Image (cartoon, rainbow, N blue to C red):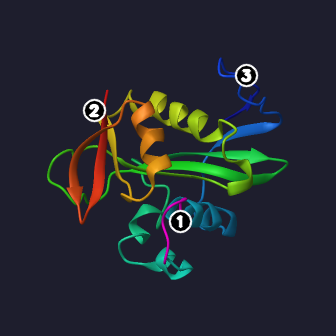
Amino acid sequence: HCHRYNQRSSNDMKILNDIEIAVLSSTETEEFMEILWTALNPEGVTGRTRSILNDPIIRPFYEDWGEPDDIGFAAIKEGKMIGAIWSRIKECVTREYAEYPELGIGVLPEYQDMGIGSFLLKTLIKTCRKKYPGLRLGVNEKAIRVLSFYFHFGFEEYDKYHGSPQLKLTF
């Protein structure tokens, strides 16, 4: 199930042409891994290498994708995945909100600041709110732009884990 996204927001956002939103069917692709790398390496975060993609803490975000609780969407332009959002029930670093699925999102750098991430997050929220009490995630404390993105959507910090804010959005 796909639909085209052609929108202009009130803040004069660029029009997004020829971007399709599709159900994320696989995380076992080079395209997805590039998007995951983008998500793990936001502006302000330094010192990471691509080896983090195989880290035992990161792998549960994408391994064995397709379980009943896995929900995700891909932004596709001209046949190429340029962004994705995914959520799943997985082990939580805090006891609070462990029943909320944890989300991840990434948009390739050359497609950022065009509203794609916002649209993906709105799509995920709309889908998850029918099934879960909320969403959660951890964000690197140095990723200031990323934190403000989530705060804009109503996420709130409920804890810290090794200095990283743990955010939740309750529906």
Please tell me which of labels 2 and 3 falls first in the chain.
3
Count numbered badges in the picture: 3
Which residue ends up furthest to the left in the rendered image?
A: 95
Residue located at (48% from left, 63% from top):
62
Please tell me which of labels 2 and 1 falls first in the chain.
1
Residue located at (33% from left, 51% from top):
89
Which residue ends up furthest to the top in the rendered image?
A: 10
Q: Position of residue 167 (x, y in %)?
A: 31, 45
Locate the N terminus and report the quarter of the image it occupies: top right
Structural distance between the alpha carbons of marks 1 and 3: 28 Å
Residue 41 circle label: 1
Q: Position of residue 35 (x, y in %)?
A: 61, 60
Residues shaded magenta = 42-47
Residue 133 circle label: 2
Instruction: State if disc 1 and disc 2 touch (CB < 8 Å).
Output: no
Mark in the foreground, 2 or 1: 1
Amino acid type for the residue under numbered disc 1: Asn
Amino acid type for the residue under numbered disc 3: Arg
Locate the C terminus and report the quarter of the image it occupies: top left
Q: Would residue 45 be counted in the magenta stretch?
A: yes
Residue 8 circle label: 3
**Is 81 left, or right, of 164 in this rendering?**
right
